[in-house]
Amino acid sequence: MANPEEGGEKKKKNGDEPKPESTSNGGEKASVVIENKNVIEIDITAPEKQKEEADPDFQKNKELFRKLGEMQTSGGNVLSEKVELGLNKLRKSSIISEKTFEDWVRRQINVRECCKFVKKKDNKDDPICKCGNKRSFHLPRTVEMGPEAKWDQLSCTTLIENNAFGKINFAGVDTTTQPQYMRIAVDNGRTETIKKLERLFTEFWKLNEPDLLISVTGGAKSFNVSHDICGSFQQGLLSAAKSTNAWLITGGQNCGVMKLVGDVIGRSIFTSKICTIGVGNWGKTWRREMLLNKNRIKYDREPDDHPKSREPMVNYTLDAPAKGYAALDPNHTHHFLVDDGTAEKEGIEIDFRGELESLICNMFTKDGVSLPMVTIMIEGGMQSIDQAVSTLRKGKTLVVLKGSGRASDILCYGFEHSIEMEREVDGEIVKERYLTDTCRAEMEKLIDKDFAKYKAQGIVEKMINAVMEISTYRKTVTVFSIYNPEPLDFYILSSLMQSSAGGATRMRQMRLAITWGHARVAREFIFARKEYKFSTEELNSLLLFSIIKQRTEFVKLLIDYGANVRDFVTQAHLTRLYNELRSSTGGYRLLQEKRKKEKLERGVMLSDVGSIINQIMQGSFRSILCDPKYNERAQGNETFENPFDVMTIYSCLADCQSMALLFWESSKTPMATGLVAHKVYMFLDKMESKWARMDEEMTEKLENAAHEFEMLSCGLLTACYHSYDKTEWINILTVKMKDWGYLNLFVIANITGSKNFISHAAYQSYLTDIWMGNIHASTPTWKLLLYIIPPLPIFLSFNARFTNKDGTMKRLDSTEQDNAPKFSARERLELYYTSPVIKFFLNTITYLIFLGVFMATLLSSSRGSSDKDGTTSMSTAAGDTNLKRDVSNNETSTSDNQDIIGLTDIYTIVFVISTFPVELAQILAKHTKSVKKKFAKHFKKVYNLLDFLAVILFLFGFAIKARLASGTDSEKKERYDLKKFSGYHEYRLISSLCFAFYCFTFMRMFEINSKIGPKLFMIRRMSIDLFFFIFLLLVFTMTYCISSEALMYPFNNDPLGVKVFNSVKRAYLNVFGDINMDGIDANLKEGHCTKNSLHSTWKTYADDKNATCEIEDLIKTTVGKVNYYFTFGLLCLYLLFVNIMLINLLIAIFSNTYADSEAKSGIIYKTQRAEVILQFRERPWLPNPFSLLYFVGLIIKKLFDKCICKKKLYRSQIKKVNKQNASFNAFRASLIEAECVNIYIRKKKQKAVSVTSLLEKLHMRFTVIQHAVENVEKQIKKSSAMDNATLKKSSSSSKSTSLPITMELPFVTHPIHKFSRVSPYGGTGEVMRVPVPDDKVLWNTLHEWYDPPDFTNETVVSTDTDDLDSIVFNSVDEKTKLDRTSLYTPYSVVDGDPMNPVGRTGLKGRGCLRRWGPNKFAVTIITRWARPGTGNVFSIKNRQVIEVLLVKNDKDSPYTLPKVICDEEITKDSHKNVMKSVCYDYEEVSATENENVDKLINSAFQDKYDLVYKGYFDDTVNTDNAWVEVHVVNVHIEGNFSTVPPATGTHTEIVTWTKLDEKANLRLNDAWLLKLACNKLHCYNPWGNDILI
């Protein structure tokens, strides 16, 4: 260990530093003292070579450092700012550098050790010094002092080189990293090296910059906190640390709250990202000797590559510490062990921890604002209280966990129950907080309970004073309870928002709130207060940050508070957004694929994004992002005409659906944007399967997002369809949009493949108009077909509607219809034959004719050349058998005629050739820029591919036939030879396949039919299922057929192909029932006996030489028996699996496909119908093969128009007019779409509100039923547990005048302020309430502009003082016995004002009530059976009717239930007093009668007495700060008492019995109570199931 004297020699006094001296190489050295610590010699005149190798500012740095040397040598001790900057720069250069981290620590960070041993205790093995350390822990040259010597920290300790730093390897503990640790010396709580730690954090430990500093303090030794509080604390802390990149500071020990923090950090997958710093006491650290450098791990060899490759590391054993010590926590990332040379002093690290926190906050200052910090206190003792006071004095925030115990609960109690008081000090009014005697006594009890052993040290008064000081910081202290609706991180953020600093602080707070994701905090603490107004640049910066973090609520909040999206969406911002896409998003993956494919090394540009959008849209248009003006400069400020569309597509590529919906609502073209977003999500879903991420959750998310956007577009079209005229929504479908490549919505729907949008009624209606053209839609099909022959179409009726070339339509109004010119005969013929429906019919007819002619050509029989004897010789493949057929001369001449190409052949070839220009025109009409993509998109359809194959085969077959027609006689004779494929047979084979393809393509004509069209789709779906099913069938078939073939034909020498074909044919036919056991026997016999003349072999190996090769004899042999039965077993298994299992599986698959397709049959038919209509709209009006004439005429017309200049001028004028009309139509369409968005969103919200209201009602009723059932169960259990005799005895001996405490209350949901919001207030006619919507009643719902008037009726007699701070709410006043507790729930007190527990009323103050807070009334419902003159009980609907006793306070007031206000606890005597003083006041009449009434009342309360309701009462006199609560009981009287007439009391004018039926005139809130009483009495209820409140 280092010599303390040597360590002391390194300390230099001011003024003793050596002056600069010359070096041997001509350089000049200066010895400089830095911060009164180490002497560093700096060569300030380096040689020329060193000057060149150093940084360019060497001369400037040298002069700065020369000034530093002059200041230090002259006795100066203060460094100027410039010199400090120069020193920092020189530290990083080659002039001043510590080679390793270890060198820097040894020279800059000292530790303190005891250098004078003063014996304290006798210990035979190892005596203990007064510093607390044993003799073995002292330095070797420690001076021995006598036991009478005085030990002092300053004189008996010395600073030495650091001997404990590096990394810790916790033996036996599974940790992700080895924590860094460092022992550090302090003097009287202040460190001389605290500023040097800044370099430690940034340069050596290289910690990332935090956004927040969280300091956690609390209990360590006796830490006893509930599991719920610990879980809530850990979850909130981890959420805060993860989202804000926070640093955590604790005590670093493996106990108490520090272990709680370490455990949550250790379990988190983000452990490496969360910096957790522990500040502990070196003297109180368990097994600290293991942390000394001498115990470092010894490596086998020193590293050669880099001195930092193996950092110093020690092993540390984590076991149970001795009393008074604590081990280090293994999950902290860094440990500071504070040392003052002692081992018994506690709390030496508190001041160092405070300075360290201040250093960290000042290190990361931005815009003059230090790093925000919050201290969380959980449980704890006096040290935690002191640390909390220190934190608040520095202006930091404090969050206390209520319910965690000890100091935290004491602090929360004092904070909540302290009362503010003003007093005059030196002529100034000073506000202070104090505790009432009751609260102070309660607080002393809490302190005595938890800190009884410290009572002699005056901890009670000390803690109370500290708590009172903390309670003055009302804005920076936040109390958190696990029963609060929001999590801990919400309250941490709320506490940080309490400060009201300048804009820089607000910007930092907003960034914290955005990172945390709590928009409510920002709304309440920043925007609602209006203390600071953000500039445009600040709003744009925050909006950019919110979008990057994908905080949709903040984006909406910023837009609501002034952020302009049009100004924000610039080239620079959008480029940055795409460059900062998350790596998990689909857009990022697409951009990376493009960069990798094109080998791009630059960042993402908007042109890259535009090319991806073009790819998604199949090249149908050129994205606006590909415009050169958005890609010329990387930081351009060019804005976009429709920024919301651009941001919607960005949000889709960023996988943020909520943000996409937010921007979509403000889009200029919401329908088109929704369809494009749908396409983007579907493309990303398709790419998910390509990337093979197997993320089902992501796939489902993308599918749901795509469907949502599709349905949004459909919903807008529905709103427009029902709200506007047909002309308007047709204009929306057909208007061309600049941002979408001048495509209209009609085309975009087809490009995106939105089946639901295409199936919409508006879209289909427009398709019907296209389909029928100008023919009247009501014209029947038979009439269209009948009039297809010219000139019959001139007699049809046509619409006065014109169709433009671009597909847009103009419908004439009634006036224009009358004045519209009549169509001429030529125009009628043109309108008829150019309509798509007629084109369809003509093409169908000509196609059928083509198939008929082709069929006749194909089936015409050709004969071979005749022999002289009248027979034709034909060779067969099986042998040389000659088939003789009589051929007449007529047949021979016919066969000769087949060599000639006839008219049918010419017709078919002309028809096929005419399909070329038609198909080419369809391909070029595709909405795709690339020709390659046009062809790919065209041949993606199966019918188009079959059509192409049919054409190729037909031309190939026709070429063969043409060659045969021109062949020689010998060639004509050979073409019928069956031994080989000569020309004739090739022609027929190719033509047969071609005819099959043409028949299949003809099926597309049926897609327009609503019945057959969906069935064709089912066939396609089933064909795909069947294709995959064949693989399963092939496995079983090959298994059986090959095995059986090998066993049945062991001596078969046929070619391999023949063997496979025969075996597969046999197995395949077996599936369809072709099973013949005799056939199996014959096959087995043939394979073993007769195949390839092996009968002699059979006789050679047979047992009986005379045996014949029959199946019976064959089975007797061993091989034959095995092969026979094994083949039979294979057949059984094969049929079992294939016929039963696989066939039924195929049936099930087909059934599922059918059910799925049948459910979508409507959409399928409408989609196929749209494809057919759009296809025939583009076809020429002449069908094949006459379409060739159409194209020839079209070419001639184009050439003719090109030669005439007048036509060009006319077309340019028409184009200009059309462009003006298009811009007007686009503007009008955007206005209509915006209105449709409002209509759709409004209906959606109304539907959501109605559903929510219905669910709330159902939930309320379900809860009532549930609680009623629970109460019944409890009563049944109690009744079964009690004996009848015991019940009687207890009831007769019960003389208590108070209500039983354990009495079960019926569950009644509280009203939501129906009467408490009625205006004017309480019938005054003057005082008006502020309107409060239903969704703003609850206090936890934000109501930004809620500022109700204050009203207190001074005429009402009240015993309450107006000084609310002197009133103790939620408790019983011990002196006055005034009960201010609530019958409903404990209520909140905000700034001394009691708050209505239900919510807002629109009026604050005391109103017309007597007391602040709850005004409790005892309400007694007195009932009897209604008996008319007959004496029998009156009934309605088989239910007995009751009468209720109602009172009037004066003649003008309405009847109400009898009640009395109570200041004390409401008991049974309170309700007896209601009956005596209000309804039966006989004191003034007769003492005898009064005594009789008392007896009757007592007996009534014993016989029929039920609690009806206890809690909050919705009344018109309620306010925000005073309200009515009721305790309602029902007393049902019978017998003599029911006939006693009521007597009015002092304050009662009228008392009367009222029959409770439909005619009863009552207040609704009183009726609500009577309804509850009727339910208890099981009597007639005139209100039924109506919800009165």
Image (cartoon, rainbow, N blue to C red):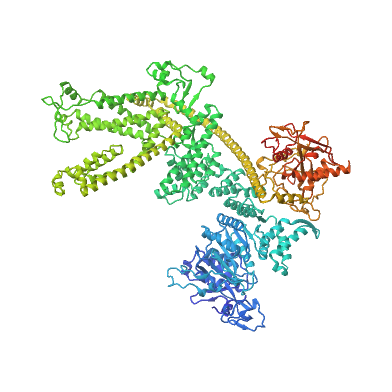
Residue 1182 in view (yes/no): no
Q: Quadrant of the N terminus?
A: bottom right
Q: Give me the residue at 49% from left, 31% from top.
A: 760
Residue 145 in view (yes/no): yes
Where residue 259 sits in the image (x, y, percent)? Answer: 58, 63
Where residue 536 sits in the image (x, y, percent)? Answer: 60, 46
The residue lying toward the viewer, choosing from 1503 and 1467, is 1503
Looking at the image, the residue that sits furthest to the left is 868
Name which quarter of the figure residue 1064 lies in. Answer: top left
Q: Is residue 361 above or below residue 11?
A: above
Q: Give me the residue at 66% from left, 51% from top.
A: 1281
Q: Quadrant of the C terminus?
A: top right
Q: Is residue 114 left or right of residue 858?
A: right
Q: Is residue 958 left or right of residue 523?
A: left
Looking at the image, the residue that sits furthest to the front is 1285
Q: Is residue 508 above or below residue 14?
A: above
Name which quarter of the figure residue 1158 lies in. Answer: top left
Name which quarter of the figure residue 87 lies in. Answer: bottom right
